[in-house]
Amino acid sequence: MDNFVLVFGGTGNYGKYIVESLIAKNVPVKVFTRDVKRAKLKLGLKPEFFEGDVLDQTSILNSLENVRAIIISLSAMHPKLIRKQKEIEHDAVMTILNEAEKKNIKRIVFISIYDIQKELIEKLKLDVGFLKIAIEERLANSEFFNWTVLGCPPSYIIFTRFTRKRMMLVPGGGAPLIPSIAPQDVGEIAAQASIRDDLNKTRFKITYSEPFSFPEVANLFSRIFGRKIKYRKLPLFGLKIASIISYTINPYLWHLVKYVGLLNKFPKNLVKKIPEDHEKLKSTFDFQPMTLEDYLKTEYKIDS
């Protein structure tokens, strides 16, 4: 009997919350992982684990036994993985889809970038954007799959990563306003989507109800942590030079600079639609959106 929801990328920033939400719903969940021991330390013993290499077709095929739905949340945005970004975020995903079709597994939930704006992706030469476009086109052109795409913005994690002690240093300063979301909310929405069959050929933008600005977030951090945290714009010139110099050794910084470029040029037309996109989520899924303040208090174990 096909019971499991199979999660690719189940130990990642979104993946771990996807797995937790599925477990909370008593949904049988299987996690594809390169290292079962490390995955168990992160996710506990409740999921079933399949140890394999996502770049190996046989591993993917074998992982699909007794699976009724697949959630794909793969990312290679890590210094140790970035050289294999195309292989992980494109080639492996295509293999997953091809093998799923052979196994008659129709339900696919794909975690993608917030929006597919080809002109901006081409202008910024955003590699991950081209990869996601190809996957989304593969799904859109399929008559077989029952698919849902969840377009995710930077999560709340980005604000904490730019903050050190009493300073929020933002490369390029950031766009005036950007969407963001608690990773817990992505996990809950993805889990709900995977066990529903009525969301075929649907794309959602996963966002909180309001946009965020870095200066405002710095003020929020100051209030929550009880110390003044200053917002500062970090010039991009030095970062760009460093990314060029280090490219042959490790291209991670190069890709990071491109990502920062998107963060600084986030389209205003998408910002205007944030309330509308959020309402679509609220009317479709049963969840209570987590505020940035609640997220910080949860992550840092701060009493109200």
Image: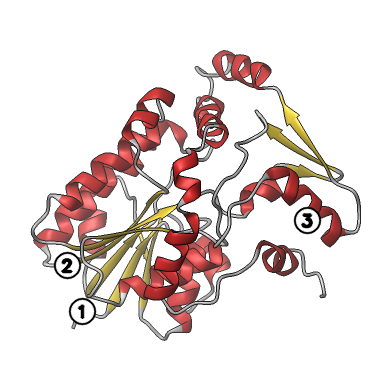
Q: Name the residue carrying label 2.
A: 105
Instruction: Between label 1 and label 2, give the one nearer the viewer.
Output: 2
Numbered badge on residue 2? 1
Q: Secondary structure at mark 1?
A: loop
Which comes before the other along the chain, label 1 or label 3? 1
Residue 296: % across, % down: 72, 62
Instruction: Between label 1 and label 3, give the one nearer the viewer.
Output: 3
Q: Name the residue carrying label 3.
A: 220
Quadrant containing the C terminus is: bottom right
**Tag 3: residue type?**
Leu
The answer for how far apart the CA atoms under marks 1 and 2 are is 9 Å
Please indicate whether residue 240 sits to the left or right of residue 233 in the image: left
The answer for how far apart the CA atoms under marks 1 and 3 are is 46 Å
**Residue 68 falls in image quadrant:** bottom left
Q: Is mark 1 in CB contact (under 8 Å) with mark 2?
A: yes
Which comes before the other along the chain, label 1 or label 2? 1
Residue that sits furthest to the right in the current view: 227
Quadrant containing the N terminus is: bottom left
